Image (tube, rainbow, N blue to C red):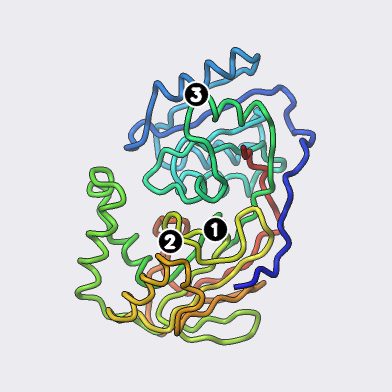
Amino acid sequence: MSDTRGAAPAEPRRPEPHSNGKVLIMANPTSGGYDAPFLQDVRQRLERQGRSTEIRLTQRAGEIGETCADPALAVQTLVVAGGDGSINEALTGFQDHPAPPQLAVIPTGTANVLALELSLPRTAAAVAEMILAQKTKPLHYGIANGRPFALMASAGFDAEVVHGVPLSLKRRFGKLAYVVTAIRIGLRRKSAPLDVTLDGEHFSGKFAVACNAHRYGGPFVISPGGATDPGLYMLVLERDDPWSSIRYTMALLSGRLHKAKGATVRPFNVASIKAGRTVAAQVDGDPFGATPLEIQASDKTVPILVP
């Protein structure tokens, strides 16, 4: 699996829309990974170095996105303490911001694939050091039906699982909730064929995922392009019957999914995923309606802090 996209080097520190150096940390206090002492530790370390820092706990769904869309947001660094869904919410808000601040991530959610992708730190000392060092890379992202995604947008079995997992089960068992839901859905589902178009070329399959990152579902690599590289890739699997699913899973675990029979990985500029009947879709691990999906890379980037 060759990478046709150029790797993006770390960006030098650039002028920020707000030069006050303020840091805003946003977190959901009802999430399973919320850790108040950890966030206070980060705040205190930053303030000892002269950085004005605020911790703001969300009170409703969508508040991170609303804050990130506010053109009056007067901070240099917006820190999201959460999972991939919270990062997606921030990106959605930043689409409407004329000059987004730097984005930083403290991985605390059920799914933290972007944190693995960028090798983000997980100790308070290392998080504070990363914020103080001000080393950024451009976070590229895709757009699916107007919604940004930092990791993936897909249609098929995985989206059915994302739609079907109960929130109570997810909060109680974390990633295990997805396994339980996948088994329950897999025993009774009837899949639908997908028509995938990549820059005018047609492909047929039962599962399709547009990738903006190397990884999928954790440490498993399915795409040669990373989240800080420009461009998108599409993975299409021809079949999703039980035997094929086992084969693909074994190939995924061994890092050879792109070489599996019936698997196609291609770079693209513009893509669509359609089906003869409604097929569930998901974006960055959250439910996102259903097919059809129209997908392309955004022409914008967001500066994200990296170690």
Q: Mark 2: which secondary structure?
A: strand
Q: Which numbered circle lies on residue 147? A: 1
Q: Say which quarter of the image contains residue 78.
A: top right
Does residue 280 appear to the left or right of 178 in the view shown? right
* Separation (CA) of disc 1 from disc 2: 9 Å
Q: Mark 1: which secondary structure?
A: strand
Q: Identify the residue shown where x is 40% and y is 65%.
A: 253
Total numbered circles: 3
Q: Earlier in the sequence, mark 3 or mark 2?
A: 3
Q: Identify the residue shown where x is 43% and y is 67%.
A: 254
15 or 125, which lies in front? 125
* Separation (CA) of disc 3 from disc 2: 29 Å
User: Taking 259 as reference, is 281 above or below it?
Assistant: above
User: Taking 161 as reference, is 64 above or below it?
Assistant: above
Q: Mark 3 points at which residue?
A: 55
Q: Say which quarter of the image contains residue 197.
A: bottom right
